[in-house]
Image: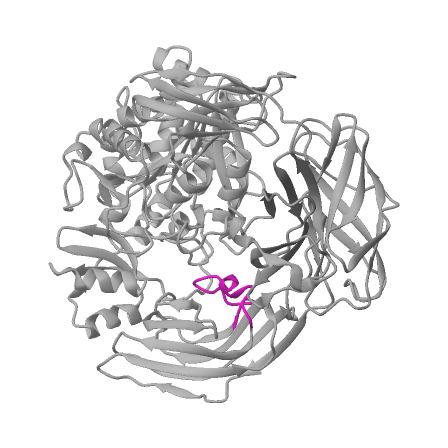
Amino acid sequence: MSFLRRFAPPIVALLLWIPAGSVAETPDRTSRPERPFPARVELDRGGEVMAFLEKVDFNIDAVFDGWARVYVDQEEFEKLQRQGFAATRLPDDAPRMAELARLHAHDDPGHILEGSVPAQYHTYATLTADLQQIAADHASIVRLVSIGQTVQGRELWFVKLTDNPDVEENEPGFTYISSMHGNEVVGKELLYNLIDYMTDNYGTDPRVTNLVDTTEIWIMPSMNPDGTELGQRWNANGVDLNRDFPDQFTDPINSGTGRAPETAAIMAWRKQHSSTLSLNMHGGALVANYPFDSNPAGSSTFSPAPDPDHDTFVWLARTYADNNPPMSISNAHPAWDNGITNGADWYAINGGLQDWQYVWYGDHEVLVEVSNIKWPSASELPGFWDDNLESMLAYMERVHEGVRGIVTDEDTGLPLAATIQIDTSLHLTYADPEVGDYHRVVVAGTYQLTVTAPSFETKIFPGVTVIAGAATVLDVQLGPLPVQLQPFGFDLQDAGNGYFDPGETSTLAVTLENLGRSATHVSAALIPTGYFGGAVQADANYPDIAPGATAQSIAPHYDVTLAATTPPGHRAGYALEWTTDQGVGQSDPFFIDIGAPVSAVEVSLDVPYDIPVLPVPTFISSNLTYPMESEIVTVRVTIDLTHTYVGDLLIELISPAGTRVRLHDHNGGSADNIIGTYGVDLVPFESLSAFDGEMSSGIWRLEVTDDVLGDGGALNAWSLEIDGRPPEASPPEMKFRRAEIRPSGARFEWWPYPGLTSYRIYRSTDPSRAAAFVDVTAEDGDPTDTLFDDGSVDPVSYFLVTGVGANGEGPKGHFGE
């Protein structure tokens, strides 16, 4: 194991470590808000203090037996003391240690024992130079990849380590990430030394060689280099990166928009790379923490992953902890079991990397706290290396246990982007679309595997046995489904106001999606599914459509018309009868909203309300009457609320229908005031889309609760802006789709219409008299679907079908024979 590359003479080091364009060693210390500091908060046996910390959104860093370490600013610290909690400021050595690392970055560490590591920390510049040197020295197995830049412009380096780094192969992906908290740096050095160890021992050590030859390994020693250079937990903008990822309960939109650049870079990278098993390293405790870190209540409660993954996560966490002697006996919290713990059982967080990897990508990730001290003396680094080397190697080797295989198209042999489900778990495994390989880590046992892919048949494999220490191989060939074309989207090319208005004709381009095998020589005829819409130009051609692909109609597109008598709020329905070389079929309908949406702003007239500083919780309720009747499409809430500590507040909006949405729930900490518009520049705690489809008119209510003592303010003003559709007075007439005469009766089907809850069926032998039609809905096995089997003995029957929705039953107009 060689570390000589880091300790060349100083003049060489300068040439190597400061390449053109690199970030300076001295960090940017531009003015920022007061740096939060660590504090010790004593916990009570009844859990009142912990519940308070969780409710008011304190940044909990770790919890031990009887106390918690939290990061607070001065105002938050005083808030704790005003509540009567015992809180003590803790020393923060990270800025001093960061400065020491810079001062000693180029020191000669002297003699290093065989198999040991230097007692020296990297800076960003020395880490960059050393990784570049490793990549140059081991070009056959290493690629150094920047996946983006930090706030201050530093590169986010990933090392890709595998035997054929430029070729996508049938092998599992493995990921190590460290130091997303900038002041937790032991993991950074462990991962750098692991890279150096594996590259130096490749080809001579069978264990290392096998890992590199059979695994696509990605290692990021430092996810937050700005924070490390600044000697702080957060990135340079003050964001805690392990609270910044999408969360299944509080932030379920898997998008990097609005997140820290470091978070967004990891998310973008992950979308392009398969990873089967991961681990991210932290510091400040000594424990392996497995999902889930969060739960719906946001409380410190045992929150296991669904079977069989809970047992799998325990097995993975045990692998790391049991091979680390100090960790294997670590029990500093009641939830710990000899060095492992369920995340939320220890303490709950939202927005963590670990849960995001598992929930959105099926990647089994464990978070490991590798050192009780976040930034210990450099002299302790060799000891940490000794404690963690076997854990790191053994954990990586787990990626080759479970079940694996390749999923291909049985007709062409090409790889498929398939989804693999084990038993009934909702957490899925995804095959790599380039090779078709999947790798599912799971503890030994017998399972059912379900393999699916868009446009292909589903196959189920019961009784798949997984044995310890190996991977069961199950290759799968899926047959493509018959051609099935369905509407994917449309573009109304209106020459007027951009909307489909009564009495006008517009051009309509329709996009089809192919849910089956390849479709060639595609054409389709447009069919109105109701009585107000029509088709002037009803035929269009399409390009060939591959399985799972989409294609828009080729010009000239369709021309559609709308009757002048079309009522407000109606939706014009259309379907497509398609023809291909492979067969013919009929699509489901799609619907076009009629006319422009309506919008109005209403302001509350009963404000302001004071939120006084009282020794008891304060509750205020403000009403707003919204007169415009519409079906809600979008709600925006503008609020002007001044308060000296917004983390004290719960703010909820209640619609006339009684739907309740939390706009703000004790988040924001010690920040002052909430001024802005939810749905524009403010992000609601719960989605405002919960109101979609309701009627807008009536009394809306804004409730504000301040249930934490010591701060106050006022609700000065608030207003609602609602975009909606005019309400439809009643459901339209139903139009029949198809009928089939059978010896035992008839089966017929009608086109559906959105928003209806059920249908009513009427039958008669005399179509000339409306009174002759008798309600026979009771004969329908399912009045919510659009199918009816008639078993009557009448020689000739006529039928009427009406729709039933929130606005009553539709008219009895046209009948079907």
Quadrant of the rendered image containing residue 587:
top right
Q: Identify the residue shown where x is 52% and y is 73%.
A: 637
Q: Nearer the viewer, residue 572 or 246?
A: 572
> Where residue 702 sits: x, y (%)?
43, 77
Above or below, 36 relative to 406: below
Above or below, 777 relative to 464: below
Quadrant of the rendered image containing residue 178:
top left
Task: Please check the rendered image and state whether residue 445 is part of the magenta-colored stretch, yes or no.
Answer: no
Q: Which residues are magenta?
A: 677-695
Left or right: where 802 falls relative to 264: right
- The colour scheme is one colour
Quadrant of the rendered image containing residue 117:
top left
Q: Quadrant of the N terminus?
A: top left
Report the predominant secondary structure element of the magenta stretch.
loop
> Where residue 191 sits: x, y (%)?
37, 32
Residue at the far left: name it: 45
